[in-house]
Image (spheres, grey):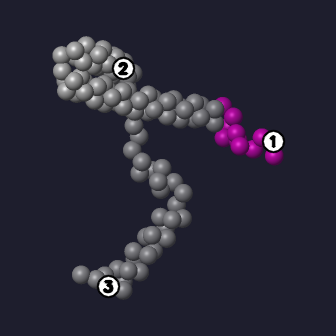
Amino acid sequence: MPLSEDEQRILRQIEEQLQRDPSFGRDIKPRQVGSRRAVIISSIATVLGLVFTIVLLAVSPYLSFVTFVASVVALVVAERHVAAIGEAGLNHLSDSVRSRLGGSAGSRGE
């Protein structure tokens, strides 16, 4: 079903407003919160998975492959949590620097 002229006009207005709003993408991006406990657990799981991969090579290459894939998944989980912790830490650091400098951090050296 095609849109009416009024609906098309309204849609264009909404698109223009969203294009002019620089904080739109930042506002809808969900914040990820990393967990140090999850980093530790998934790191241990990665190491154990690699150890089991080596041990299971003597038993079955298929089981060894499965444990290798599991260790890669655990490594990806750890990396995501580390990245979220790093991003949250950087955001906290930049907020504290801005509050100490009174919001004029970008005006030096000009």
Relative to the observer, which residue lies in front, 85 or 79? 79
- Going by the numbered disc 3, the residue's amino acid type is Ser
Q: Which residue is mark 2?
A: 43
- CA distance for labels 2 and 3: 56 Å
- Going by the numbered disc 1, the residue's amino acid type is Gly
Horizontal arrangement in the rendering, residue 31 relative to residue 103 (left or right):
left
Region in magenta? 99-110
Q: Name the secondary structure under disc 3.
A: loop
Q: Could you say which quadrant of the image residue 100 lies in?
A: top right
Pair 2/1: label in front: 2
- Where residue 91 appears, as percent x and y from the top left, is 53, 35
Tell me the residue at 54%/57% (across/down): 22
The mark that comes first in sequence, 2 or 3, is 3
Q: Which residue is mark 1?
A: 109
- Mark carried by residue 4: 3
- Going by the numbered disc 2, the residue's amino acid type is Ser
- CA distance for labels 2 and 1: 43 Å
Q: Name the secondary structure under disc 1.
A: loop
Tell me the residue at 18%/16% (across/down): 59
Quarter holding the N terminus is bottom left
Horizontal arrangement in the rendering, residue 108 relative to residue 68 (left or right):
right
The mark that comes first in sequence, 3 or 1, is 3
- Where residue 46 appears, as percent x and y from the top left, is 33, 21
